[in-house]
Image (tube, grey):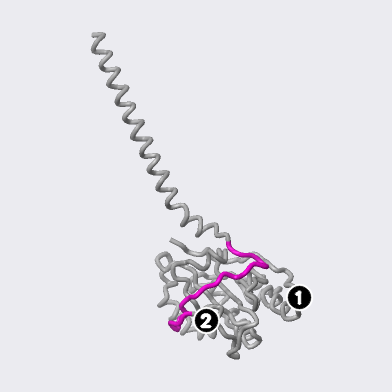
């Protein structure tokens, strides 16, 4: 009987060791899986980006007209090299972006002749937000008669370089491709009738006078950028 008890105890120990070994392997496998997925989530949720005084990241993106555009090929309303660029990350589907749509059109119509064209960039992943597909972008631009470029950040490679996290979110870039202002268009993204301070317009006017924008950075209010 004593001999049988010893055999039974030994068998239990082997079983426990095997279970522990499997658990450790599973934990290592899970950890490796999480580690391999982490970079994509980090880029989407915590981009490094650029701030005021930094150089604006270069890009070459497809417009709704099917052509590729970059800082080197964009012109102002007069066909001249711009004095600056109003880069706005925006989209079709975000209520905040929709509420800002006419303001963005008006900004381009006012400032593109002065040398500051709007360059709108759609950063959302259509796999997550189908209403922001390239086909939907073309349709929306046609319906609204967008006078500005509406570029598609296909592959979502550009917005993390800027550090954009919201739609709409503004980066005012000067002729030397230096970021001079970043943040919100104004102080009332939801209701244009309630605007009291036009941050972006004030920043452009300051640059025109050879002054520094004040404030040079505000908090962008809008929808989070959609990434897989």
Q: How many marks do you count on the picture?
A: 2
Kindly check if marks 1 and 2 are in contact, taking CB atoms under 8 A apart as contact. Answer: no
Give me the residue at 33% from left, 35% from top: 22
- Residue to which mark 1 is pinned: 211
Numbered range of the magenta stretch = 49-68
Q: Using a 10 Å C-alpha cutoff, classify the residue at mark 1 as few (fewer than 14 neighbours), some (14 to 19) or many (20 or more).
A: few
Q: Position of residue 98 (x, y in %)?
A: 53, 74
Give me the residue at 70% from left, 75% from top: 203
Of all residues shown, which one is farthest toward the bottom? Answer: 78
In terms of secondary structure, where does tag 2 sit? Answer: strand
The alpha-carbon separation of the residues under discs 1 and 2 comes to 28 Å
- Residue to which mark 2 is pinned: 149
Give me the residue at 42% from left, 77% from top: 136
Left or right? Give the position of 34 relative to 215.
Answer: left
**Image quarter of the N terminus:** top left
Q: Position of residue 79 (x, y in %)?
A: 58, 90
Q: Nearer the viewer, mark 1 or mark 2?
A: 1
Residue 130 figure quarter: bottom left
């Amino acid at each position: 009987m004593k001999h049988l008890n010893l055999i039974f105890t030994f068998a239990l120990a082997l079983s426990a060791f095997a279970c522990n070994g499997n658990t450790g392997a599973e934990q290592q496998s899970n950890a490796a899986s999480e580690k391999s997925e982490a970079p994509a989530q980090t880029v989407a949720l915590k981009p490094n980006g650029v701030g005021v005084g930094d150089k604006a990241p270069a890009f070459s993106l497809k417009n709704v007209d099917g052509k590729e555009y970059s800082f080197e090929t964009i012109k102002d309303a007069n066909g001249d090299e711009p004095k600056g660029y109003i880069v706005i990350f925006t989209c079709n589907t975000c209520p905040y972006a929709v509420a800002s749509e006419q303001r963005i059109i008006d900004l381009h119509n006012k400032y593109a002749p002065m040398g500051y064209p709007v360059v709108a960039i759609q950063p959302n992943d259509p796999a997550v937000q189908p209403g922001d597909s390239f086909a939907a972008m073309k349709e929306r631009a046609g319906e609204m008669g967008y006078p500005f470029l509406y570029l598609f950040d296909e592959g979502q490679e550009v917005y993390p370089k800027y550090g954009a996290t919201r739609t709409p979110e503004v980066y005012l870039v000067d002729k030397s491709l230096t970021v001079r202002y970043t943040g919100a268009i104004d102080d009332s993204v939801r209701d244009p009738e309630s605007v009291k301070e036009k941050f972006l317009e004030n920043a452009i006017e300051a640059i025109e006078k050879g002054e520094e924008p004040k404030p040079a950075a505000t908090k962008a209010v809008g929808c989070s950028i959609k990434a897989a």
